[in-house]
Amino acid sequence: MRSSITAEFIQNFLVVWDPSEGSELYKKGFYGKPLGIPKPKTPQFNVPLVLDLMEGLYLAEKRIIHVVEGSKKRRVSLEKLRKTARKLYEDFDQKYIVYKDLREHGLVVTPGIKYGCDFAVYKQGPGLEHAPFMVSVKKLADEVTATEIVKAGRLATTVRKRFIIATPDTQTKKVSYLIFKWFKA
């Protein structure tokens, strides 16, 4: 079964060239960024939509999009997207398990680089609220130092977010979440 939305694989991104299809996808869960519009005021826009590989892989697995590349518009496999993402993202498999789990729970997930974490997570979506959560992904075997927790706590308090450490189990694909809440004394 072919999905109705076509995304073109270009280097490390996917582009939905048709603005109406891009707008439809954006409305379904704030996927992607409209080209040249950093903070869209409305889910309708008249420009292409750019998806990062993590959300593109998720949408392709869900069969919401199908991915093509080149002048002949050859279909791109999920494995090729995954392989490219593994080169692009450090610890991609762990981060993708967390991304997928958060999305499956109805949350909106965007890159958290500006907060120094892996993901900024929304209950409703960007433009409707400020992201209430910042999520850092750690392997089960990783150690977290007290200094890291204090730094994260200071940052989270400054930007008014809850700091969450997510630890995915790559075998079971289940994720454990450790949520920190700071109180003023």
Image (tube, rainbow, N blue to C red):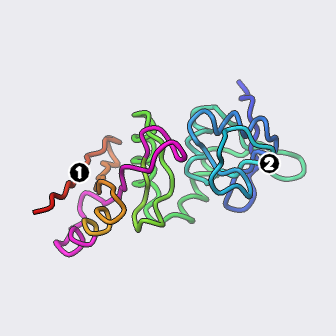
The reply to whether the magenta stretch includes residue 115 is: no
Please tell me in which quadrant of the rendered image residue 173 appears: top left
Rendered location of residue 152, percent (x, y): 28, 67
Q: CA distance from mark 1 to mark 2?
A: 38 Å
* 175 lies left or right of 14: left
Q: Residue furthest left?
A: 185
Under tag 2, what secondary structure?
A: loop
| The residue stretch that appears in magenta | 122-151
Q: Amino acid at mark 1?
A: Ile
Q: Quadrant of the C terminus?
A: bottom left
Question: Within 10 angstroms of label 1, few (less than 14), some, or many (20 or more) residues?
Answer: few
Rendered location of residue 90, percent (x, y): 46, 66
Answer above or below: position of 113 versus 147. above
* 185 lies left or right of 2: left
The residue tagged 1 is 179
Please tell me in which quadrant of the rendered image residue 61 appears: top right
The residue tagged 2 is 47
